[in-house]
């Protein structure tokens, strides 16, 4: 069915795509080839460059370098509209349609059939039904779009995009909010389109779906092309390795367990804590001077675990104990009162306040903990800033510089300093080395080790397995929104973690 | 079928309230239930319906237009001066004022769109501007004595027993019908709804959001100008203090008529009924003869509360019933 043997000329070919934002290289000479009738998975962890690649090929951002051909003709779309006109349509995770309009209006908005300036409602509905029936959908097209499930809304968006003469369809995580049945409906539509000769780029982080529907896989890692192969030639373990691991030959130095032997006091223990639809109940115990790492693919439930621990999302079952006493952690405020600190992954949106200075950012969490009634004096703030700028080697060492002007690694240090200023007993780090340059990685890891030695309990989420194995005393492996394994001591090896992540679920997800 | 019924629920509720009110009034005052009362209802509220039609477009698109009352006031003063002092023929004056209003509305729409300012602030400024300019033109009440005015006020479709469908009422009915066609049957109308549903999505779907916004405010101002013409026909005068607060009456009518103030949902016919309900209360008070006319405001206020609560309830129920089968996803 898929003529991979004869290798027809590529429908869409990108060569040497590069893009950097303010010194950070988001895409580094990436090649990508899409054939007609192919469903091509584009995979990678957060920050691997998937979204940037899509934005660059649809003209939403301008590429710095690289060429792009569609059917052998060089094109350079300047906007999403431009790309659509050329035949490249994109459907995002967020359905970009008018929820209040009818399905038919949504399909034909701006190009409704008219006579004497009036929309021919009957004709439009007839065409809408015909269009949707190609996707195996038979629904009331006069009902408002919002009365249908997200899956159907996605198919309407796809039908609209494809009907505007698309040759290439890019689906950016369309399945993220769909249940198993809805995914099937969507897949049927995708197969239908591929059979018609449309090339589909499918971005997802569900590996099962990749193996269920895709013909070819391209993996990006840290803005580079990590590999591209037909799906049959890339078994699960190799795929996960491409996504997470560098070359396995690379030496990974296990540190000697620092706190071996002496069992330190439990800071916090979680038993059966979970939240329906977000993360299955798990046990977790966090000890002073102990680093627990959370490993897993994007969407496996790592961040969700951390959010429950810090009270960002309330758990709906289980119980937490802090210092041997039951504790209800219903909000970040309560977590902070218990001595927890949290550096989120999305530094820009959840962490730093770019407009405020280094000093103000560092003082923020301590101030919040003390309450608005006892403000930190300017002298205390200056002392605090000076202390942490020295301690963490924040550069440039200027406390009055807006944080937005610092490099990624230094922003991360400021964020870390903010929590360290509150002297937490448990510090949660979500992807502490994401998006910072390689030199800064080593510094951050050094910091993690120092903090641990000083008796702080640490919970670290990281996709950088090589880094994780160097500092973690225990690694919890997550898959499909559940904790599936707990590795400690000699079990903590990149290969063990990869193998655990790649294990196919015992039964196909029936849920 | 059930779905389209539920979209119509707010309008049906408004219609039910109007009919119930009419029945109650007729039971209290036997001569209330007459064609004459109905015809007067149409004539007396003609200008308000015309403004409300424009306001419906604006609100469905997710905006608001606070300037319409002032535009009516300005229009009446301008017409009185143009016809009586400057000797402009009435029909030419009509065309002139509509062009001025169109330019005024287009300017407001352009400012809202291209300076990315909230419609509330821009049209509030427009409200002060239009009112201020009408005071500048004249602070007196100016009678209009042109032949056309006398002629038009005599002209009416007569149904006997004093029931007359006057020119203002006829203009109003034409505006309502044209508004319904424009909103419900054209591409422009669909774009108005799309803007109210999601401005970003409308843009991504290739709708020219800027052009549509400018057109919507142009339409609203032109209809306000037309309402001003009708108002001047009705009163045969121009006065800079006329139609103060009419923008709020229009917004109230639109909301009572089932249009969601946050945009995306609503019907022209609902706004028509909304005005009629307000007119009904006014008529009841004049039949009573003892009640202060401020009771009309109190009743309108209570009705507004009731309708907003009702809308929230139906929205809530609709969303819940929609979520239930889709699975418990946050």
Image (cartoon, coloured by chain):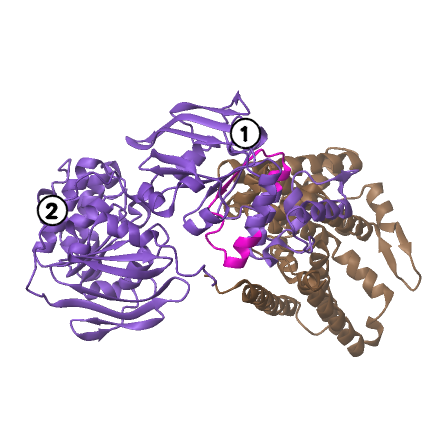
Name the residue tied to disc 2: A388
Q: Quadrant of residue B316?
A: bottom right
**Chain ID, brown in image:** B
Left or right: where A140 falls relative to A420? right
Palette colour of chain A:
purple
Q: Which residue is painted at 15% across and 41% down in the image?
A: A442
Confirm whether the magenta stretch covers residue A162. yes
Direction from residue A97 to residue A377 in the image, left or right: left
Q: Nearer the viewer, residue A118 or B269?
A: A118
The residue segment tinted magenta is A160-185
Is A26 magenta? The answer is: no
Residue A7 rendering spot, x and y as whole percentages: 51, 29
User: Callout 2: few (<14), some (14-19), or many (20+) C-alpha neighbours within 10 Å?
Assistant: many
User: Going by the image, does B223 lie left or right of A407?
Assistant: right
Residue that sits furthest to the front in the current view: A5
Judging depth in this view, the residue of A239 and B122 nearest the camera is A239
Rendered location of residue A389, percent (x, y): 12, 43
Chain label for disc 1: A
Q: Which residue is mark 1?
A: A82
The image position of residue A458, as x and y in percent, is: 18, 57
Residue plotted at (58% across, 56% down): B261
Front position in the image: A322 or A194: A194
The answer to which image quadrant residue A266 occupies is bottom left
Callout 1: helix, strand or loop? helix
Element carrying mark 2: helix
Which is nearer the N-term, disc 1 or disc 2? 1
| Badge 1 density bin: few <14, some 14–19, many ≥20, Cα 10 Å | some
């Amino acid at each position: 069915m898929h003529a991979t043997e004869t290798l027809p000329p590529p429908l869409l070919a990108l060569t040497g795509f590069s893009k950097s934002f303010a010194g950070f290289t988001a895409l580094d000479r990436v090649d990508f080839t899409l054939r007609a009738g192919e469903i091509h998975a584009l995979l990678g962890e957060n920050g691997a460059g998937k979204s940037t690649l899509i934005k660059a090929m649809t003209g939403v951002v301008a590429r710095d370098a690289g060429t792009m051909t569609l059917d052998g003709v060089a094109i350079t779309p300047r906007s999403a509209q431009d790309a659509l006109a050329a035949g490249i349509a994109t459907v995002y995770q967020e359905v970009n349609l008018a929820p209040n309009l009818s399905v038919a209006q949504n399909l034909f908005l701006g190009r409704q059939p008219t006579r004497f300036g009036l929309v021919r409602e009957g004709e439009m509905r007839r065409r809408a039904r015909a269009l949707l029936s190609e996707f195996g959908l038979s629904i009331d097209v006069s009902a408002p779009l919002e009365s249908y499930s997200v899956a159907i809304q996605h198919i309407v968006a796809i039908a609209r995009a494809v009907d505007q003469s698309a040759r290439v369809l890019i689906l950016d995580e369309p399945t993220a909010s769909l249940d198993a049945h809805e995914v099937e409906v969507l897949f049927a539509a995708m197969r239908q389109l591929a059979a018609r000769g449309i090339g589909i780029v499918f971005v997802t982080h569900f590996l099962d779906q990749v193996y269920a529907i895709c013909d070819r896989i391209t993996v990006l890692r840290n803005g580079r092309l990590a590999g591209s192969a037909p799906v049959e030639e890339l078994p699960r373990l190799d795929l996960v390795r491409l996504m997470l691991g560098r070359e396995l030959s690379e030496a990974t130095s296990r540190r000697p367990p620092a706190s071996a032997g002496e069992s330190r006091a439990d800071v916090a223990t979680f038993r059966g804590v979970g939240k329906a639809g977000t993360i299955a109940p798990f046990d977790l115990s966090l000890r002073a001077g102990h680093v627990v790492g959370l490993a897993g693919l994007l969407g496996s439930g790592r961040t969700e675990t951390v959010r429950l621990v810090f009270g960002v999302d309330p758990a709906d079952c289980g119980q937490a104990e802090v210092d041997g006493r039951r504790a209800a952690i219903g909000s970040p405020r309560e977590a902070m009162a218990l001595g927890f600190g949290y550096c989120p992954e999305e530094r820009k949106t959840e962490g730093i306040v770019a407009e405020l200075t280094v000093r103000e950012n560092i003082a923020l969490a301590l101030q919040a903990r003390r309450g608005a009634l006892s403000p930190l004096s300017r002298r205390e703030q200056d002392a605090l800033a000076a202390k942490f700028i020295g301690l963490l080697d924040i550069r440039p060492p200027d406390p009055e510089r807006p944080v937005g002007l610092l490099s990624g690694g230094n922003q991360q240090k400021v964020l870390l300093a903010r929590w360290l200023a509150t002297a937490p007993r448990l510090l949660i780090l979500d992807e502490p080395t994401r998006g910072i340059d390689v030199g800064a990685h080593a510094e951050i890891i050094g910091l993690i080790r120092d903090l641990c030695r000083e008796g702080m309990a640490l919970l670290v989420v990281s996709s950088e397995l090589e880094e994780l194995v160097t500092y973690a005393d225990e690694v919890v492996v997550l898959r499909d929104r559940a904790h599936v394994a707990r590795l400690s001591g000699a079990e903590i090896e990149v290969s063990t973690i990869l193998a655990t992540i790649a294990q196919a679920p015992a039964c196909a997800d029936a849920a | 079928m059930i779905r389209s019924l539920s979209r119509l629920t707010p309008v049906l509720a408004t219609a039910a309230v109007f009919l119930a009110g009419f029945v109650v009034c007729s039971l209290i005052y036997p001569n209330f239930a007459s064609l004459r009362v109905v015809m007067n209802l149409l004539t007396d509220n003609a200008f308000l319906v015309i403004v409300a039609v424009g306001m419906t477009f604006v609100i469905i698109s997710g905006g608001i237009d606070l300037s319409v009352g002032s535009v009516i006031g300005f229009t009446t003063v301008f017409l009185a001066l143009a016809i009586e002092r400057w000797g402009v023929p009435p029909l030419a004056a009509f065309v002139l004022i509509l062009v001025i209003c169109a330019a005024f509305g287009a300017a407001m729409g352009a400012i809202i769109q291209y300076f990315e300012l909230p419609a509330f602030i821009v049209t509030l400024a427009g409200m002060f501007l239009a009112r201020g300019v009408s005071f500048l033109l004249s602070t007196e009440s100016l009678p209009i004595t042109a032949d056309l005015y006398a002629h038009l006020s005599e002209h009416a479709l007569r149904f006997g027993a004093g029931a007359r469908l006057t020119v203002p009422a006829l203009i109003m009915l034409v505006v309502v019908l044209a508004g319904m066609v424009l909103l419900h049957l054209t591409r422009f109308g669909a774009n108005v709804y799309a803007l109210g549903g999601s401005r970003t999505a409308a843009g991504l779907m290739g709708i020219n959001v800027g052009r549509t916004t400018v057109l919507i405010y142009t339409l609203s101002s032109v209809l306000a100008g037309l309402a001003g013409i009708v108002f001047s026909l009705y009163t045969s005068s121009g006065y800079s203090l006329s139609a103060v607060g009419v923008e709020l009456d229009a917004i109230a009518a639109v909301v009572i008529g089932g249009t969601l103030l946050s945009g995306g949902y609503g019907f022209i016919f609902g706004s028509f009924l909304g005005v009629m309900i307000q007119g009904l209360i006014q008529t009841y008070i004049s039949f009573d003869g003892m009640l202060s006319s401020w009771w009309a405001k109190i009743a309108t206020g209570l009705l507004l509360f009731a309708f907003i609560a009702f809308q929230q309830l139906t929205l809530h129920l609709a969303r819940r019933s929609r979520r239930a089968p889709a699975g418990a996803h946050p």
